[in-house]
Image (spheres, grey):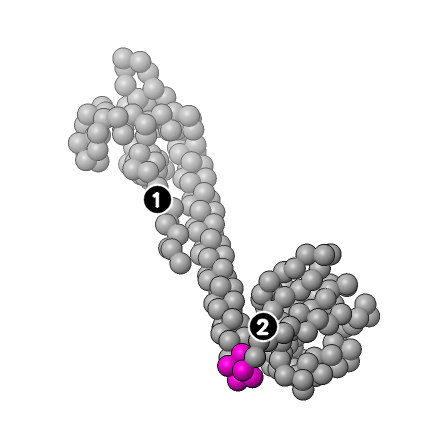
C-alpha cells in the first residue's frame, strides 16, 4: 500500500498568509505601503516571481491594492483576517480528505488480505480432504433475519464454520465478498465447509434472530 502524500501548501500561499497575519497583528497598518518585491523576495528568501504571485492572491482577496508604478498598499485588516480564516478551513478540509484516502487504502489492503486468507483456507480443505472442494449453493430465505446484515456483523465463520467464497445476485457472481457485504433478498450463497458446518449454516440463516448479539471479527477476518 502506497502512502498518500499530504497536502503541500505552495510557498507563495504561505507568504500571503504570513503577510496577512502581520497585517492582522498590527505589524503592518492599513494604508501602509509594502516593501518592494525585491526586498520582500530577499526577506522571504524566494524569487520576485513568488512574491508577485503572493501579492496577486492578496489583491484578489481585497487585502492589498496593487498600484502600477506606485507599489502595493494595504487595504483592509478585516479582509486579511477573513483570508486567514478561509485558508485554515481549506487546510482542515485537505487534512480530512487525506485521512479518508488513507482509511480507504487501509480498507482495500484489508479486503485483499481477506481474499488471500480465504484462498489459503480453501487450499487447506483441499489438502485435508485430498479432493477438490466443491462449493455448496444455499438460497437465502426471503424472510431470513440475516437480510440487511453484513457477513462480518453476523460472524458467519465463527458461528457456523463455513467460509463464504461467493454470492450470486441477479445473475452475477460476487467473488470473495468479504466482511462488509450485506445480505439481500434473492441472494444465493456459495460456501465451503464440512457437512456439519454446512448444516449449521443452513440452520443459522433460518433461525437467526435480530436480537442476537453481534459477533466481532478479529482484524484479519475469516469471511
Q: Earlier in the sequence, mark 2 or mark 1?
A: 1
Q: Position of residue 106 (x, y in %)?
A: 46, 61
Task: Kindly give the residue lying farthest to the right in the view shown.
Answer: 143
Q: Residue at x 69, y 62 (%)?
A: 168
Q: Position of residue 126 (x, y in %)?
A: 54, 79
Q: Nearer the viewer, residue 183 or 171?
A: 171
Task: Kindly give the residue lying farthest to the top in the view shown.
Answer: 69
Q: Position of residue 92 (x, y in %)?
A: 45, 48
Task: Identify the element where label 1 is drawn.
Answer: loop
Q: Residues within 10 Å of mark 1 (few under 14, many from 20)?
A: few
- By secondary structure, the bulk of the magenta-drawn segment is best described as helix
Q: Which residues are magenta?
A: 125-130
Q: Is residue 47 above or below residue 220?
A: above
Q: Is residue 169 something that shows in the picture?
A: yes
In this rendering, the label closer to the viewer, 2 or 1: 2
Task: Kindly give the residue lying farthest to the bottom in the view shown.
Answer: 196
Q: In the figure, residue 171 lies in which quadrant?
A: bottom right
Residue 8 disc label: 1
Q: Does the stretch in magenta take in 129?
A: yes
Q: Residue at x 63, y 74 (%)?
A: 134
Q: Is residue 221 something that shows in the picture?
A: no
Q: Nearer the viewer, residue 169 or 93?
A: 169
Q: Residues within 10 Å of mark 2 (few under 14, many from 20)?
A: many
Q: Is residue 171 above or below residue 129?
A: above
Left or right: residue 4 compared with residue 47: right
Residue highlighted by disc 2: 223
Q: Residue at x 58, y 65 (%)?
A: 176
Q: Image quadrant for the C terminus?
A: bottom right
Q: In the figure, residue 150 lies in which quadrant?
A: bottom right
CB atoms of marks 2 and 1 within 8 Å:
no
Amino acid at each position: 500500500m502506497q502512502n498518500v502524500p499530504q497536502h503541500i501548501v505552495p510557498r507563495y500561499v504561505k507568504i500571503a498568509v504570513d503577510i496577512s497575519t502581520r497585517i492582522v497583528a498590527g505589524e503592518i497598518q492599513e494604508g501602509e505601503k509594502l516593501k518592494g518585491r525585491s526586498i520582500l523576495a530577499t526577506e522571504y528568501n524566494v524569487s520576485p516571481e513568488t512574491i508577485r504571485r503572493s501579492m496577486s492572491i492578496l489583491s484578489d482577496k481585497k487585502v492589498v491594492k496593487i498600484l502600477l508604478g506606485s507599489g502595493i498598499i494595504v487595504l483592509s485588516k478585516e479582509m486579511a483576517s477573513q483570508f486567514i480564516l478561509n485558508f485554515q478551513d481549506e487546510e482542515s478540509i485537505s487534512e480530512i480528505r487525506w485521512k479518508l484516502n488513507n482509511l480507504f487504502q487501509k480498507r482495500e489492503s484489508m479486503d485483499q488480505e481477506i481474499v488471500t486468507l480465504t484462498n489459503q483456507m480453501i487450499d487447506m480443505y483441499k489438502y485435508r480432504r485430498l479432493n477438490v472442494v466443491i462449493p455448496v449453493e444455499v438460497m437465502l430465505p426471503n424472510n431470513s433475519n440475516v437480510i440487511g446484515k453484513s457477513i462480518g456483523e453476523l460472524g458467519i465463520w465463527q458461528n457456523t464454520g463455513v467460509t463464504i467464497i461467493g454470492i450470486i445476485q441477479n445473475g452475477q457472481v460476487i467473488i470473495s465478498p468479504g466482511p462488509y457485504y450485506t445480505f439481500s433478498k434473492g441472494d444465493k450463497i456459495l460456501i465451503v465447509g464440512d457437512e456439519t458446518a454446512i448444516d449449521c449454516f443452513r440452520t443459522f440463516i433460518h433461525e437467526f434472530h435480530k436480537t442476537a448479539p453481534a459477533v466481532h471479527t478479529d482484524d484479519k477476518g475469516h469471511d
